[in-house]
Image (cartoon, grey):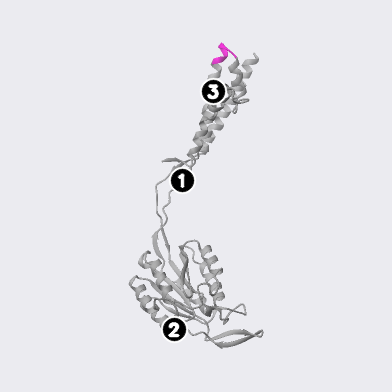
Amino acid sequence: MIEFAWPWLGLAVFLPLLARLLAASGRAGGSLLRLPVRVELSHSVAGRKSAALRPAVWLFALLWLALVGAAMRPQWLGEVAQPPQTGRDLLLAVDVSGSMAAEDMVIARRRVDRLTAVKVVLGDFLERRIGDRVGLLLFGQQAYLLTPLTFDRAHVRYQLETSVIGMAGRETAIGDAIGLAVKRLRERPESQRVLVLLTDGVNTAGTLEPLKAAELAASEGVRVYTVAIGSERGATQMFGLQLNTAGAEIDEPTLIAVAERTGGRFFRARDTAELAGIYAEVDRLEPVEYEGEPLRPRDELYVWPLAAALLLGLLLGGLQWMEGMAWRR
């Protein structure tokens, strides 16, 4: 079927008539849209010249209709199709509690805090997620969904890079983060419900216990991959010196139990190399085929009325030339 992208431009077809009426009523100083010179001259002659007027007027009318038709952008619409796509739906839950400030990770021979290391590794991870939908959830004392599942990986990366430690509170609500993720993933097909949870601490806040949240995730078919971040020894700055301290406590047994109960896996990331290896493991998840966004092919047709207008313009010009030659005789 044919459809016009800008149908409202069809109103322009009445502009010559409007210009003619304004000129005839004297409400305009002159014609807003002048006809070809030879057509206007033909109006002033009588009898034998009146017949020459009709072809020029008809040619001009057809020329104007063709121009208006091209301006309306006619398009040929094909059949609606939903091509299958393959990819994964991944929701990332990142801990931004106070303990993520521990500087026990190394990037380019420079010590950085745990959240900075996660941002660097996750940034590379997102770059390779072509065809996947990714969402971002941040949690501390409370859990917040910053970005729902989307193909816009650049936006997810921006939201991650602009996050700061403590923005969701200084404590850690692991159970609430899993609960919120389950709520957001339950609408997805069961084979696509995947949560990757990164934390460096123990559940110290929230209303939902991690193991209870794991049971909820298992009942909804959500696989949880838990990642424990941080070395056994932490680090702090004092008088400009880097001091090693006891690392923040990580409740590995609970994180292992959460992963096992949901059909996921537990990973331990003591440095950025191990953290990067974890995402290589996520890459091995089997992509799932799903229906893509409905697509309807559109072929632009404006070139045809535009070509017709050009041809009519040439004919009109030729007719004027012939009339001019006849007038001189």
Quadrant in which the N terminus appears: top left
Disc 2: which residue = 252
Q: Could you say which disc has been placed on residue 102 in the image?
A: none
For residue 299, above or below residue 106: above
Q: Quadrant of residue 239?
A: bottom right
Q: In the shown orientation, is residue 266 left or right of residue 24? A: left
User: Which callout, 3 or 1, points at the residue further toward the start of the chain?
Assistant: 3
- Select label 2 or label 3 by which is in front: 2
Q: Where is residue 119 in the image (x, y as percent from the top left)?
A: 55, 72
SS assignment at label 1: strand
Q: Does the magenta stretch include residue 46?
A: yes
- Select label 3 or label 1 by which is in front: 3
285 or 234, nearer to the observer: 234
Q: Position of residue 265 (x, y in %)?
A: 41, 78
Q: Does the magenta stretch include residue 128?
A: no
Mark 3 crowdedness (10 Å alpha carbons): few <14, some 14-19, many ≥20: some
Q: Quadrant of residue 176?
A: bottom left
217 or 321, nearer to the observer: 217
**Mark 3 and 1 residues: CB-CB less than 8 Å, in contact?**
no
Q: What segment is highlighted magenta in the picture?
A: 45-50
Q: How far apart are marks 2 and 1 (CA)?
A: 55 Å
Q: How far apart are marks 3 and 1 (CA)?
A: 35 Å
User: Which callout, 2 or 1, points at the residue further toward the start of the chain?
Assistant: 2
Q: What residue type is labelled 3?
A: Val
User: Which callout, 2 or 3, points at the residue further toward the start of the chain?
Assistant: 3
Q: What residue type is labelled 1?
A: Arg
Disc 1: which residue = 298
**Mark 2 and 1 residues: CB-CB less than 8 Å, in contact?**
no
Disc 3: which residue = 57
Q: Distance between the residues labelled 2 and 3?
A: 87 Å
